[in-house]
Image: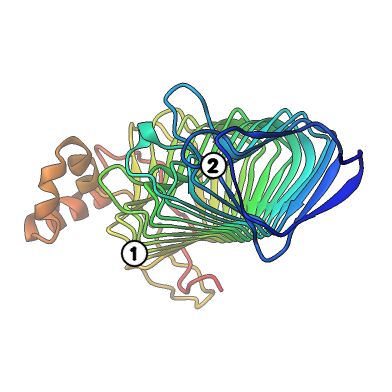
Amino acid sequence: MAKSNDTIIVAKDIATTFPFVINKNLTLIGENYPVLDGLNKNEILTVKSDTFTIKGFKFQNVGQSFTKDHAAIRLIRSKCFIIEDNLFENIFYGIFLEKSGNGIIRKNTIRGNATVEFKSGNGIHLWHCKNIVIDNNSISKVRDGIYFEFVDNSTVTNNHSYNNLRYGLHFMFSNSDEYRNNTFERNGAGVAVMFSKKIAMHKNIFLKNWGTASYGLLLKEIYDAEITDNTFEKNTIGINAEGSNRIKYLNNDFRENGWAVKILGACFDNDFKKNNFLNNTFDVAYSGRLNNNSFENNYWSEYAGYDLNKDGIGDVPHRPVKLFSYIVNQSPESIILLRSLMIDVLNFSEKVSPIFTPTDLFDNKPLMNSVQ
């Protein structure tokens, strides 16, 4: 019988139809990745201790349920933990944390086999947690790669979240968190940040999140955030913002997206500065005619102005909103007219004499060269 604070080394595979329950402070070390198999019946490991470490196991075949969130590892009210270097295959939920804090989840590989959202769980799921570090994990084929709900003061770094059904990373009602140096690739949408504030988003790559309702980054009802040094490439929409205020967009690259930035209703006091807008179909789409968001010192590959005094700043302001983007919003089928001469004439006339687009939405100091 193990005592509290013991270290247990496991070398043999174990199959179980009932979850193992641990209520002591333990360290579990797997030797050559022993398999813990749930036989598609139930949860595998439930931990209810203050301190816990697990390393070097392979979890597989977690049971699916429409009424319970079965997980490979569930931690409840843990105060200090490490979950490191484990493999997860054919899981419902991978790692599920409830009301836990001061923990590290790193170097795990999580592979689900999700096909539809209502029958799938999340790779790493946090509920009512704080001070968690999620670093250098690989997560694919689940509903949300990483899910935060009521999670504060936590960081997500160096993870690769890809081919997930819904979001690579999903925030709900979470504050003062940071994610940086992550790659979100080919998900239903890259990242969703909803009903949260003071989220820092730095040096991430949002790549090929492509579909009829897909985004690199979805912002909804968030406040006082920073979005800096990120790359948005080949997404249907780079950033889709609604009800999002006092956000600083700085030094981001928007490359070859359908829409680089789509600003919907109730977005105020946002600053776009020193971003590169490169070869997007639409750089900025905007709903409504009232605007108090600022655009300054951005580089626009479509800018056709001149720089007579050679100071690196265009002498003519740039209006990034095309009239045609309004038409496409109303009638998506009209996108087939994108390259027509008629649309070029419409966009040019609106740029010269704005009627439908906000008259005060322009970059007064467009850069002649891209920001390095």
Callout 2: SS:
loop
State the residue at coordinates (84%, 43%): 26
Residue wearing tag 2: 38
* Quadrant (top left, top right, bottom left, bottom right) of the C terminus: bottom right
State the residue at coordinates (45%, 72%): 368
Report x, y in % for residue 147.
56, 39
State the residue at coordinates (86%, 39%): 1
Q: Which mark is residue 256?
A: 1
Report x, y in % for residue 16.
58, 40
2 or 1: mark nearer the eye:
2
As displayed, is residue 189 above or below residue 194?
Answer: below
Label 1: how many Cα within 10 Å (few below 14, some 14–19, many 20+): many
N-terminal of the pair, mark 2 or mark 1, is: 2
- Kind of residue sitting beneath label 1: Glu
As displayed, is residue 99 above or below residue 322?
Answer: above
- Kind of residue sitting beneath label 2: Gly
Horizontal side of residue 172 vs 237, given as left or right: right
State the residue at coordinates (8%, 60%): 341
Report x, y in % for residue 314.
44, 67
User: Which of the two residues, 339 or 166, is positioned nearer the viewer here?
Assistant: 166
